[in-house]
C-alpha cells in the first residue's frame, strides 16, 4: 500500500525542508503509484497519448520527442481541448539541471480593432507547431515524422469518440456550424462509429517537414476561415515565430525550487502564492491555500509583469475567509509530463482555451482555431493589436539536487489551485506524491469554495467562513494531474485517477 503521512509530521521542520517520496510502489494500491521506466516514463491526459509517448521513448526518442508524440495524439483524440489551431507551453529540465521554458502562443491579429470570446475576432496566432519545431530542434532525437506517426495513424485509421467529446460536440454544434464546420464528420458522427480525420492526418504529416507547412502553406486557408468568421487574422500574422525560449520564474519550496512558466502564462500566480506562504511563515493549510489563491488572482490582469509581482500579494487572514471573487469558472486543456533515462524532464500543456476554441474550423487542415483573444481583460492584460493575452496554461517543474518533477493539470484558472494543493501536501506537509495527487481537492470559484466529496477539511473550511459547496469526487473542475520526473536517476511517471489520465513506461 502507498505510505501514508506520519501523524504530526506535516508541521515538523523536516517536512518543510524536504519533499515527500516518489512512492515507486511495486505493489497493488488504491492510489495510482509512480511507475519507474527504463528508457523513460510518460503521463498524459489520454491513454492513446500515453501509448504514443511510450512508443517514442521505446524507439530511442527523448522526453521531448515523447511529449510531442503525446501532444499530437491528444490533438487527434481530443479536438475539443487542443489541436494544431491552439497553443503549447513547456518547461524542460535539461540533464545539466538547467530549466528552460517554451512559450508556444502567438499574438492577436495585427489589424484587429477589438477582441471577442468566440468567432473570428477571438483567434490569436496558433503556437503549437512552432513550439514543436523549436523544442525538437534543441532536444529531439527522432525524426519529427516518427514522433508524429502514432497521431497520424490514429487520425487515418479512426477511433471511437468518447462520450465526453460527443457531449462537447453537441453543446457546441451551433457554434461550430457558424465557424464553418458544417461538413466536419464529427458533427454527424454516431456513437460508436469510427471518427476518421484524413485532413488532420495530412496536416500532421506536412508539419513534420517544418513550420513552413503550417505557417506558410496552410496560412491562406487559416486566414480565409478566420475572415469568413468576421476576424482580422491574415497570412502575414502567421509568418513571424509564434514560439520562443524563455527563462522560467523560480521560487523556493523548502529545500527545493519550483519553476513556473513565465508570461504570457499566468504561472506567476502559483509563484506568488508559494512566495507569500514562505514570506509570511504561514502554515500550509487548505485555508491558507484558498486565501493565497484569492489574493494571487487579484493580480491576474497584471500577470504579464511576471517576477516583478513577487512580494506584492495583498494581505491574507490566517484565520478567516475573505471570499475574494478570485478565479473564473471555465476549464479546458490537456497535460503531458515526460522524463527520460538521460534526465531530460518535460512538463507541458496544450489547449484551444474554450471547447473547440473559437469554433472557427479550417477544413483544409481538419482543426479548429483557438479563442485566446477572449483572455484579454484590463490593466496590463488589456487588448491591443498584435499582443499576446495572459494564458491560463501554467505547467510547473520542481527541482532538488539531481531530482526533478514535472507537474501539470487542465482546468484553466483551476490549474494554479490544483498544483498549489499538490505542492503544499507533497512539498511541505510530507505526504508522498501519490497521496498528494489522489487526495480530495478544493477549487475557489467566484467567491465560493467547491470541495470534492470526502474532503477531510470541509468542516474546518466552513467554520472559517468559506461558502463550501460539495461536488462529486472526480468532478472535472478539480483537474487531472500529470506528473513525471527523475528520482535517483530513475525516470518515473504518475497519473491522477481523475478524467482519462494515465501513465506508461518504456
Image (cartoon, rainbow, N blue to C red):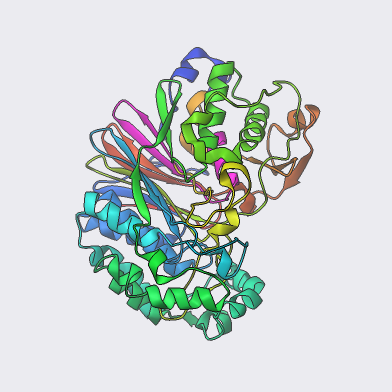
Who is closer to the viewer here, 219 or 159?
Answer: 219
The relative height of residue 279 versus residue 398 in the rendered view (above or below) is above
Who is closer to the viewer here, 178 or 347?
Answer: 178
Q: Is residue 346 left or right of residue 126?
A: left
Q: Is residue 9 visible?
A: no
Residue 407 x, y percent position in the rendering: 44, 42
Q: Which residues are magenta?
A: 396-424
x 50%, y 32%: residue: 271
Q: Is residue 383 visible?
A: yes
Residue 335 x, y percent position in the rendering: 46, 52
Q: Is residue 403 left or right of residue 494?
A: left
Q: How many marks?
A: 0
x 57%, y 23%: residue: 277
Residue 203 x, y percent position in the rendering: 35, 74
**Could you say which quadrant of the image residue 373 lies in?**
bottom right
x 47%, y 61%: residue: 110
* Residue 405 is a magenta residue: yes
> In the current view of this chain or complex, which residue is farthest to the top?
13
* Residue 267 is a magenta residue: no
Q: Is residue 123 left or right of residue 379?
A: left
The relative height of residue 458 versus residue 335 in the rendered view (above or below) is above
Residue 425 x, y percent position in the rendering: 54, 30
Amino acid at each position: 500500500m502507498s505510505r501514508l503521512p506520519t501523524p504530526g509530521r506535516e508541521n515538523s521542520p523536516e517536512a518543510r525542508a524536504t519533499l515527500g517520496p516518489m512512492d515507486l510502489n511495486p505493489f497493488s494500491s488504491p492510489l495510482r503509484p509512480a511507475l519507474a521506466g527504463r528508457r523513460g516514463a510518460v503521463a498524459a491526459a489520454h491513454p492513446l497519448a500515453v501509448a504514443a509517448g511510450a512508443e517514442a521513448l521505446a524507439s530511442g526518442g527523448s522526453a521531448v520527442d515523447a511529449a510531442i508524440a503525446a501532444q499530437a495524439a491528444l490533438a487527434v483524440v481530443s479536438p475539443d481541448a487542443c489541436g494544431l489551431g491552439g497553443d503549447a507551453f513547456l518547461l524542460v529540465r535539461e540533464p545539466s539541471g538547467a530549466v528552460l521554458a517554451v512559450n508556444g502562443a502567438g499574438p492577436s491579429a495585427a489589424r484587429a480593432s477589438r477582441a471577442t470570446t468566440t468567432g473570428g475576432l477571438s483567434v490569436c496566432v496558433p503556437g503549437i507547431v512552432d513550439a514543436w519545431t523549436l523544442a525538437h530542434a534543441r532536444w529531439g532525437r527522432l525524426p519529427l515524422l516518427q514522433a508524429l506517426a502514432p497521431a497520424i495513424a490514429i487520425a487515418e485509421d479512426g477511433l471511437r469518440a468518447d462520450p465526453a467529446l460527443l457531449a462537447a460536440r453537441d453543446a457546441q454544434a451551433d457554434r461550430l456550424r457558424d465557424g464553418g464546420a458544417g461538413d466536419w464528420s464529427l458533427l454527424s458522427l454516431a456513437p460508436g462509429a469510427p471518427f476518421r480525420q484524413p485532413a488532420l492526418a495530412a496536416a500532421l504529416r506536412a508539419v513534420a517537414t517544418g513550420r513552413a507547412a503550417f505557417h506558410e502553406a496552410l496560412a491562406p486557408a487559416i486566414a480565409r476561415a478566420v475572415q469568413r468568421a468576421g476576424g482580422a487574422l491574415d497570412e502575414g500574422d502567421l509568418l513571424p515565430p509564434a514560439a520562443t525560449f524563455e527563462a522560467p520564474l523560480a521560487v523556493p519550496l523548502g529545500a527545493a525550487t519550483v519553476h513556473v512558466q513565465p508570461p504570457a502564462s499566468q504561472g506567476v500566480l502559483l509563484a506568488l502564492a508559494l512566495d507569500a506562504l514562505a514570506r509570511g511563515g504561514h502554515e500550509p493549510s487548505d485555508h491558507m491555500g484558498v486565501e493565497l489563491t484569492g489574493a494571487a488572482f487579484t493580480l491576474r490582469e497584471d500577470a504579464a509583469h511576471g517576477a516583478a509581482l513577487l512580494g506584492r500579494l495583498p494581505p491574507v487572514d490566517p484565520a478567516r475567509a475573505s471570499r475574494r471573487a478570485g478565479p473564473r469558472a471555465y476549464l479546458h486543456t490537456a497535460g503531458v509530463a515526460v522524463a527520460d533515462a538521460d534526465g531530460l524532464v518535460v512538463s507541458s500543456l496544450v489547449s484551444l482555451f474554450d471547447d473547440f476554441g473559437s469554433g472557427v474550423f479550417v477544413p483544409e487542415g481538419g482543426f479548429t482555431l483557438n479563442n485566446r483573444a477572449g483572455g484579454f481583460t484590463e490593466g496590463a492584460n488589456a487588448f491591443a493589436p498584435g499582443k499576446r493575452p495572459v494564458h491560463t496554461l501554467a505547467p510547473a517543474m520542481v527541482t532538488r539536487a539531481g531530482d526533478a518533477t514535472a507537474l501539470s493539470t487542465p482546468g484553466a484558472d483551476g490549474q494554479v489551485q490544483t498544483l498549489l494543493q499538490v505542492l503544499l501536501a507533497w512539498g511541505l506537509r510530507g505526504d508522498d506524491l501519490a497521496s498528494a495527487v489522489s487526495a480530495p481537492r478544493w477549487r475557489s470559484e467566484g467567491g465560493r469554495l467547491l470541495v470534492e466529496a470526502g474532503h477531510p477539511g470541509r468542516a474546518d473550511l466552513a467554520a472559517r467562513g468559506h461558502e463550501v459547496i460539495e461536488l462529486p469526487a472526480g468532478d472535472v473542475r478539480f483537474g487531472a494531474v500529470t506528473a513525471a520526473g527523475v528520482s535517483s536517476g530513475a525516470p518515473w511517471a504518475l497519473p491522477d485517477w481523475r478524467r482519462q489520465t494515465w501513465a506508461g513506461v518504456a
